[in-house]
Image (cartoon, rainbow, N blue to C red):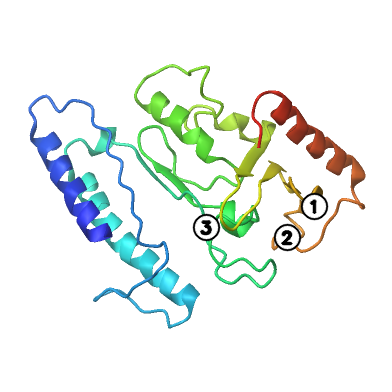
Amino acid sequence: TAERAIDIALGRFARWEASPAAPPLFLWVHLYDPHAHWIRHAGIRSFGNEPADLYDHEIAYSDHHVGRLLDRVRASRHSGDIGVIITSDHGEGLGDADHGVWYHGQALFDHQIRVPLLIAGPGVAPGVESRPAGLIDIAPTLVGWFGGLPSPQHEGIDLVRRRDALGDRLLFSELLTGPNSEPMQAVIDGRWKLIRWSKQGRARLYNLDADPREWRNRARRDPDVFARLSAALSDLNEAGHPY
């Protein structure tokens, strides 16, 4: 549970802080509670009885216990040197009526792949970044925080040192074959997003600004954009990133 995971993290943090030398510490806390099946937790706000309500309840439960760790970090004598990243690996369909998806690992629509990414720590000014980033950017950001140099193996960017590069690239997502899915791939270029289903041989183009719920296929109305993003996916596959 989140409570147990945070208890363990707090113990390790306390031992690190008590060390006279306080060597570098990397603390990764993985909370699983918002995954189905959802249960109720005493003392945590109830949002209702629908699946989306129970999901929100589990998020609130996790948020409460993450707050315990963040309170401890803020009170630490090393707080000015500590960086924190909070994110998720996926979202949930929750019975999405638009696309018929209940959980995750079934599609690449935004309710599955658009997740929070919060960064706080040395060199990070308060604010909201509207340009899209990706989970691929976390590793180079951590390396930069620890004073390391960019690695050729990192295809992402340092979100602290190189935020200026956010608007100059494509972002890719993939979904491999699973019990409830077929292979598919997606590429995002600002407001444009293309999803391609491998086995069905079909693709759909969306304008995320005008159509955030991804209802309207723009492939015929914007053939140049469709062709450009289709070529980007093909180039990625040919470069050794098959889906």
Badge 3 marks a residue whose secondary structure is loop
Q: Are marks 2 and 1 in contact (CB under 8 Å)?
A: yes
Badge 2 marks a residue whose secondary structure is loop
Label 3 environment density (alpha carbons within 10 Å; few <14, some 14–19, many ≥20) = some
Label 2 environment density (alpha carbons within 10 Å; few <14, some 14–19, many ≥20) = many
Residue ID at (65%, 24%): 240
Q: CA distance from mark 2 to mark 1?
A: 9 Å
**Kind of residue sitting beneath label 2:** Glu
Badge 1 marks a residue whose secondary structure is strand
Task: Tell me the mark number nearer the camera, choosing from 2 and 1.
Answer: 1
N-term mark: 3 or 2: 3
N-term mark: 1 or 3: 3
Question: Is residue 131 in view from this perspective?
Answer: no
**Kind of residue sitting beneath label 1:** Arg
**Kind of residue sitting beneath label 3:** Gly
> Which disc, if any, is residue 214?
2
Q: Are marks 3 and 2 in contact (CB under 8 Å)?
A: no
Residue ID at (40%, 32%): 123
Image position of 234 with respect to 5: above or below? above
Image position of 17 with respect to 92: above or below? above
Residue topped by disc 3: 91
